[in-house]
Image (cartoon, grey):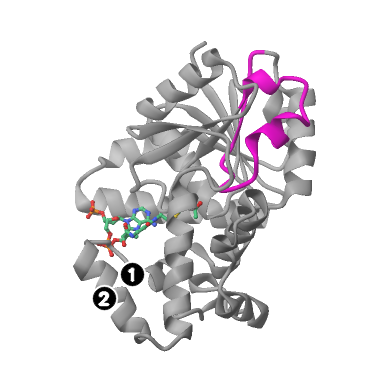
Amino acid sequence: MNIKIVTVIGSGTMGNGIAHVFAQNGFSVNLVDVSKEFLDRGVKNIRANLDRQTKKGTLTEEARGATLARIELSTDLAVCAKKSDIIVEAVNENTVLKREIFQTIDANAPPHAILASNTSSISITEIAATTKRPANVIGMHFFNPVPVMKLVELIRGIATSDETFAIVRDAAIALEKTPVEVRDSPGFISNRILMPMINEAIFCLAEGIASRDDIDTVMKLGMAHPMGPLALADFIGLDVCLSIMNVLHDGLGDDKYRPAPLLKKMVAAGYLGKKAGKGFYEYQS
Ligand code: 3HC
């Protein structure tokens, strides 16, 4: 199957980035969210990120216009599902919501359609089991900022077919990304490794081993990470980091994955990082 029409569900940071890269690479995209207000905010972000590319000279004005013209906005998921070859869900990490969405798209999408989730930690096998086509369900995990980060983790649930995997791998390559194949397991590879590092940085801060800035400097200058772990935690969202640590802790049952108490305390206080204006650092909106 050749993928031509893509529906992306959720126009937040990840969803609008995913719509952006599909549209920029020639796919027709339906971007779906629950309100016009959310959709408008998503497109505003896509425009800003395309502007960044045209200013840098990496995208022509013509390609910018063509990219935007390939994106249709909708609040009607069932209608969009009906005309899609692949649907990529990128809503909040809420299992109940994801289950509802997968039931709706399974009931409406044509039989050949692939149902993908950008989940950062929820089991693909579990999501697939809510549908009547588990062989066509796969994890397609992008990284923030989506137009910049080259990786896509492709997660095979227990029933994901070789055909589904091959089609989605080719689509990821068409997006100029590098796909990696991962078996369904808590946190997959990326978050299984990244989140314990961030969590350990938070333990170091809480234990007074070093200051916030010095912890981040160690990883930036000593390990050539573009951001230190505390700045990266703010960028990802401390609530997201906590939820992934909980998935690792529950799913793998090892206390080495226990979330740092300071992380829990900051989430309880609403210090969620960049999006909240305050996390380990302060941000102007
Ligand atoms: N959208 C599009 N392009 C963007 C962008 C955005 N939101 N933010 C930055 N860029 C582009 C810039 O235009 C620039 O492009 P160029 O290389 O062509 O000049 C390039 O990215 C670098 O941007 P800046 O010079 O403005 O800023 P930095 O050099 O500080 O880079 C960064 C910003 C790309 C965010 C960099 O700090 C970085 O790579 N940080 C680490 C990000 C990371 O680890 N992401 C993964 C998070 S984990 C995740 O998403 C998984 C989830 O499950 C938790």
Local packing at callout 1 (Cα closer than 10 Å; few below 14, some 14-19, many 20+) is many
Q: Is residue 46 left or right of residue 61?
A: right
**Residue at point 37% right, 53% down?**
49
Badge 1 element:
loop
Please tell me in which quadrant of the rendered image residue 262 appears: bottom right
Q: Which mark is first along the chain, 1 or 2?
A: 2
Q: Which residues are magenta?
A: 112-137
Amino acid identity at mark 1: Gly
> Between 32 and 107, which is closer to the camera in this rendering?
107
Label pair 2/1, CB-CB below 8 angstroms: yes
Q: Is residue 171 left or right of residue 137?
A: left
Residue 111 magenta-drawn? Answer: no
Amino acid identity at mark 2: Thr
Q: Disc 2 marks which residue?
A: 217
Q: Residue furthest top?
A: 1
> Between 30 and 125, which is closer to the camera in this rendering?
125
The reply to whether residue 275 is in sight is yes
Q: Disc 1 marks which residue?
A: 228
- Confirm if mark 1 falls within 8 A of ligand 1: no
The vertical placement of 49 against 128, above or below, is: below
The vertical placement of 33 against 85, above or below, is: below
Tag on residue 139?
A: none
**Residue at point 39% right, 32% down?**
179
